[in-house]
Amino acid sequence: MNESQKNILEGLEKLYPDAGPELHFSNPYETLVATILAAQCTDARVNQVTPAVFRDFPDAKAMAQTTPEVLFPYVKSCGFKSKAVNIVNACKIIAEKYDGQVPSTLEELTALPGVGRKTANVVLAFSFGIPAIPVDTHVFRVANRLGLSDALTVEETEKQLMALIPRDKWSQAHHWMIYHGRRVCHSQRPDCEGCALKSWCKAAHQEQMINPKADAKKRAQARKARS
């Protein structure tokens, strides 16, 4: 860890000492469903939808008994019908294979329909207390802009952050970066002038790094051309 990275992590912790999940859930099943729905959707919208979902389908076994056609009207405002399909099918597996209990390993979770590493890590970190760094679009953007990572993919970013950040702060650091991404380091118009971390930020001094996702594509193309 270099000095800038150390200062950035300390700065994030000071800026967002109470950062925590903004999705509403109270058990592993609710965490799984809410996180699947949150893909490409705001937490606020998901929080409007899930009370009715959890009322009428209170656990994985109840969800496994319904169909995507029945569930979709509940969650339509969160996006694609595939989310309803994945939730129902994942819960069928959970009901049949795990007696209705959401599994607690990365391998088992990512084998479920609609569950990638990010969703699995959210469930592990915030339902089972297993340290993890879920990397969503905010974490990917903020980590690479600030210089906490220098990665072409979400998975590379996750590995680099895990190597950099002390294990006991993984889950907290995830939320620090989400909060910073939502409040300051926006995707299109980051508030660099108002950012308390500007003096240590890699992107603040490299205009081409303003959009890490696009920059990752450029770097990947450059590496391919050199090989």
Image (tube, helix red, strand yellow):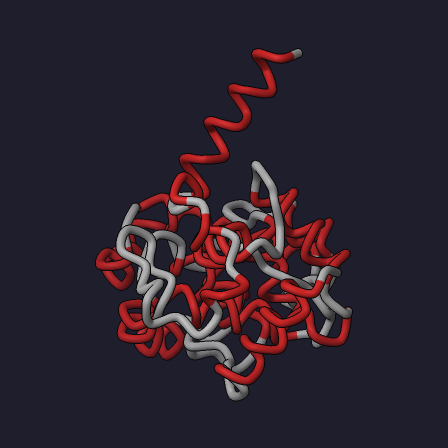
Q: Residue at x 46, y 27 (%)?
A: 218
Tell me if I can see residue 123 in this picture.
yes
Quarter of the rendering containing residue 70: bottom left
Q: Which of 118 and 15 is in front in this view?
A: 15
In the image, 108: left or right of 204?
Answer: right
From what the image shows, is residue 111 above or below residue 136?
A: above
Quarter of the image with the N terminus is bottom right
Q: Residue at x 68, y 57 (%)?
A: 161
From what the image shows, is residue 212 above or below residue 41?
A: above
Q: Where is residue 138 in the image (x, y as percent from the top left)?
A: 44, 58
Q: Position of residue 69 (x, y in %)?
A: 29, 50
In the image, 136: left or right of 157?
Answer: left
In the image, 128: left or right of 30?
Answer: right
Quarter of the image with the C terminus is top right
Tell me if I can see residue 99 in this picture.
no
Quarter of the rendering containing residue 46: bottom left
Q: Position of residue 176 (x, y in %)?
A: 52, 73
Q: Nearer the viewer, residue 157 or 83?
A: 157
Q: Residue at x 59, y 72 (%)?
A: 28
